[in-house]
Image (cartoon, rainbow, N blue to C red):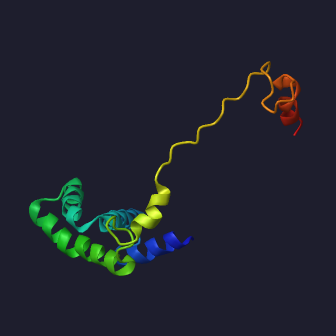
Amino acid sequence: MGAMADAMAAYAQPLIDETDGSPEQMQMALNVAMACWNIGKLPEDKRQSAINSFADSMGLDEAECEAFQDDVLMPMISRHDEMFGQVFQSNAPGRSDWESGLEAKPPKAQAPKPGRYDPCPCNSGKKYKFCCERAARAR
């Protein structure tokens, strides 16, 4: 496993330990852990709406939702903060340093490829198909 997979497995371990080992419960534990992981990555001011949305998607009534939030979600989100600190939060210090390298950059403008019968861009005086295109095909 890679480092991220190992970290995720360690993070999800408390939920995995609570299962009976059946594939269904293991999958549910990993799904809840992944949701908590993603909520933990959010800035503090956006977490509550994500928690509410997640709890609503599980079809819990108000009392069950509150118990699930207190017993599972909040402890796992706190675990995320303890294990990974502020690394994933968008307002974390220094994040913009490495995040800026991930932003999409516009493609560099490329000179259009000459037509086969156009003069060769190497200024040999030959047609492109008899000069550089032939050399490119030979490689």
**Numbered disc total:** 0
List x then y, in percent, for residue 41.
Answer: 33, 66
- Is there any visible trace of residue 90 in the rendered image? yes
- Is there any visible trace of residue 20 in the rendered image? no
In this rendering, the answer to whether 31 lies above or below 77 is: above
Q: Residue furthest bottom?
A: 82
Q: Quadrant of residue 128?
A: top right
Residue pictured at 87% horizontal, 24% vertical: 126
In this rendering, the answer to whether 117 lies above or below 109 is: above
In this rendering, the answer to whether 84 lies above or below 25 is: below
Residue pictured at 44% horizontal, 71% vertical: 8
List x then y, in percent, for residue 67.
Answer: 15, 71
108 left or right of 84? right
Q: Quadrant of the C terminus?
A: top right
Return the residue nearer the eye: 51 or 102.
102
Q: Quadrant of residue 137?
A: top right
Return the residue nearer the eye: 43 or 131.
131
55 left or right of 13? left
Return the residue nearer the eye: 16 or 79.
79
Q: Quadrant of the N terminus?
A: bottom right
Return the residue nearer the eye: 111 or 47.
111
Q: Residue furthest left?
A: 63
List x then y, in percent, for residue 95.
Answer: 40, 67
Residue pictured at 48% horizontal, 49% vertical: 104
Residue pictured at 84% horizontal, 32% vertical: 132
